[in-house]
Amino acid sequence: MITLAELATNADGKLVQGFVNEIITDSYLLSALTFDDCLNSTGTSDLTYTYKRVKTPMEAKFRALNTEPEKSKPEIERVTTQVAILSDAWNMDRVAKEAASDLYELHLVESKNAIIRKFNATIIGGDTTVDENGFDGLSKAVTGTSTDFTSAVDLDALEKASALAFAEEMDNFLSALMRDPDVLLVSPRMKVKINAICRILGISNVTMDSAGHRVSAWDGIRIEELRDGALKTNDIYAACLGMDGFHGITLKGGNAVSVNLPNWEAPGAVKTGDAEFVCGCALKARKAAGVLRQAGRIVATAPTYRYYRDSYGGTAVPEAEWAHRSARAAAWLARTEALSTVTPWGDPDECRAMALCALADKAAELDAAAEDAEGSSVSVGSVSTSYDATRGGSIDLSPAGRERAMLSAVSPWLHVYLGVRL
């Protein structure tokens, strides 16, 4: 078995070392998973992984004196899962490299990001009946098992009663696992919802990791946010990581990751680079993972003030101003959608609702800064003196500055492409 950090340390080339180190820096899941490095890369492996999983455990019983112990037999199932080749390739003209060296670096960074995004999406929703070249993920592995739960709590209209009901559901869900899980995997939308629940219940859910980074947690269990549409539902996945629970699968001999960069000195104007990661996952114990499905499944596409306050966590807009502010936010977004290509990072309804809340929040902040800036200017006769405002002085309140601020506000939820629409 091996972790990707160990793989990077043992890799022969500095290129692979750097690439893998970037991956584990940017992906908690890939850094935390242990991989069974058991497959051959010599052509003798068919990229399948077979293991035994206990369906029904053995049962111990008491016996009387002078009697033989009662025999018990575990029920074993043989599980075969597929291992996949996750790859990304790109082309670049040698003139483009010389003209813009940062573009070359951008291709390398995006190649790494593409692999992380696809791995995160597949380890949850992977299904070989949909993509025969991929691998089966957690959702398929836990479907129909004793750790497959469905939420009955409406988290859209969040109140203390629904927050308490959700906490009870989480306790029941987590108690069905073989032990306390190492991580909860959620969408950005669900992480926001859990934060709101913790605030309502008066629970502190932020801890610090060894590097001093803020980490959200539920009852001491790390919450990991799968971004960029990797998890598009509000389901909560729990995983007990390890070789006896949920783990990864890859090639042996340190061949899990390969990176090939162009030879810029070779003939030919257009060069190709690529990166590959041989990967899969296995659930060794049925109760090593589970899912609470459809948690907080109702989403307000035209968010109410309660949604803004409790789900988004906004505080800048008073309730009396919400109708006006939300209408302005919707108008800005409609104009932007007409002029640009707008793509949600996850579930379209969720991302749109959160973006509208973010826009209303940002507009309120900009308007307050503008009022402070106006109050900082004093005129005496023909002489006008401007003083730095408490908030306005450090904020660009020009039309272009406002537009940039609004685009930045929606960026966690929507990707706005400002190029020419064809």
Image (cartoon, helix red, strand yellow):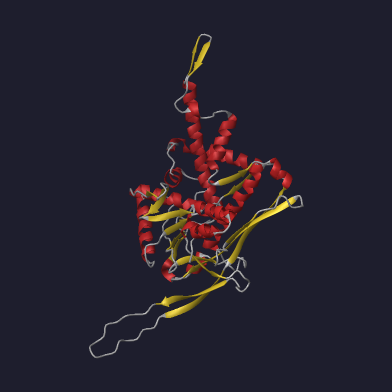
Find residue 82 and report its horizontal and vertical position in percent. 57, 70
Figure quadrant of the C terminus: top right
Residue for point 70% across, 52% down? 263
Residue for point 64% across, 49% down? 107
Q: Is residue 31 visible?
A: yes
Find residue 316 and report its horizontal and vertical position in percent. 44, 36
Q: Extreme front residue here?
A: 12
Find residue 406 and report its horizontal and vertical position in percent. 55, 37
Q: Is residue 336 above or below residue 349?
A: above
Q: Is residue 272 above or below residue 397?
A: below
Task: Describe residue 267's horizontal placement relative to residue 45 as left or right.
Answer: right
Q: Nearer the viewer, residue 248 or 97?
A: 97
Quarter of the image where one finds residue 336: top right
Q: Extreme top residue here?
A: 381
Q: Is residue 297 visible?
A: no
Q: Is residue 408 above or below residue 6?
A: above
Q: Nearer the viewer, residue 40 or 27?
A: 40
Task: Describe residue 106's horizontal placement relative to residue 141 as left or right.
Answer: right
Task: Describe residue 145's horizontal placement relative to residue 262 as left or right.
Answer: left
